[in-house]
């Protein structure tokens, strides 16, 4: 049996030697099923099946680089979504121009500046900087804006 793990959705919790993953796999097929995990049943926790990854720093950086390259491609291909996400706040009737100018415009500029740095020839330092500072915001932009909005409104109305 072969397994493939796409790292993109797991960027916040990439495995390491110090943090094994609990893993259980049950495959159901027309002729029965099999389990890798040692559980007594479908609804029980596994009693074995920890995966331990021993990545070198170079391998971990290569994984991060791949995640970044795919994330920035989505950022660059989605101008309409970004327009909806950012520009609606600039609209005086349906948005909040003050919030846009003071909070979102600088965020968009920051994320665009990181996107401009992304290239296949990035150094390890650039990969790690972008991974830590831009990637979380790119992949969860709407959540980032929600959190910033909460802080903004709290400051504005709590004096």
Image (cartoon, rainbow, N blue to C red):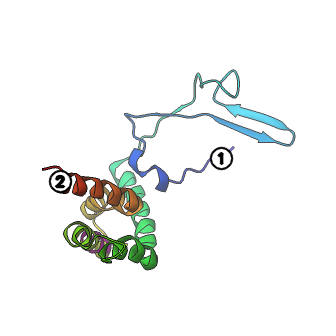
Q: Earlier in the sequence, mark 2 or mark 1?
A: 1
The residue labelled by disc 1 is 2
Residue 153 is marked as none
- When asked about the image quadrant of residue 73, the answer is bottom left
| Tag 2–tag 1 contact (CB < 8 Å) | no
From what the image shows, is residue 2 above or below residue 61? above
Nearer-the-camera pick, 89 or 60: 89
**Marks 2/1: CA–CA distance:** 52 Å
Seen in the picture, residue 102 relative to 37 is either above or below; the reply is below
Give yes or no for residue 37 being in the magenta stretch: no
Q: Nearer the viewer, residue 126 or 95?
A: 95
- Give the SS element for disc 2: helix
Q: Position of residue 14 (x, y in %)?
A: 42, 46
Question: Would you say the magenta stretch is mainly helix, strand or loop?
Answer: helix
Residue at 30% in and 69% down:
122
Name, please, the residue furthest toward the left: 159
Q: Is residue 114 magenta?
A: yes
**Residue at 28% in and 73% down:** 117
| Nearer to me, 6 or 144 | 144
Looking at the figure, which quarter contains the N terminus? Answer: top right
**Residue 28 placement (x, y as % from top left):** 77, 40
> Which segment is the magenta one?
110-115
Callout 1: helix, strand or loop?
Answer: loop
| Residue bearing mark 2 | 155
Q: Residue at x 69, y 20 (%)?
A: 40
For disc 2, the neighbor class at 10 Å (few under 14, some 14 to 19, many from 20) is few
Q: Position of residue 48 (x, y in %)?
A: 57, 24
Residue 131 figure quarter: bottom left
Mark in the foreground, 2 or 1: 2
């Amino acid at each position: 049996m072969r397994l493939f793990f796409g790292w993109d959705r797991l960027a916040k919790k990439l495995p390491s030697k110090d943090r094994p993953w609990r893993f259980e796999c049950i495959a159901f097929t027309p002729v029965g099923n099999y389990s890798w995990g040692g559980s007594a049943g479908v609804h029980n926790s596994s009693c074995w099946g920890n995966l331990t990854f021993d990545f070198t720093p170079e391998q971990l950086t290569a994984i991060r680089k791949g995640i970044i390259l795919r994330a920035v491609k989505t950022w660059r291909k989605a101008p309409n979504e970004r327009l909806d996400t950012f520009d609606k706040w600039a609209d005086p009737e349906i948005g909040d121009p003050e919030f846009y100018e003071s909070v979102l415009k600088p965020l968009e500029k920051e994320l665009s500046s990181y996107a401009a740095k992304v290239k296949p020839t990035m150094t390890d330092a650039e990969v790690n900087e972008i991974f830590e500072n831009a990637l979380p915001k790119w992949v969860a932009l709407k959540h980032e804006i929600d959190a910033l909005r909460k802080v903004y409104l709290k400051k504005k109305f709590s004096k």
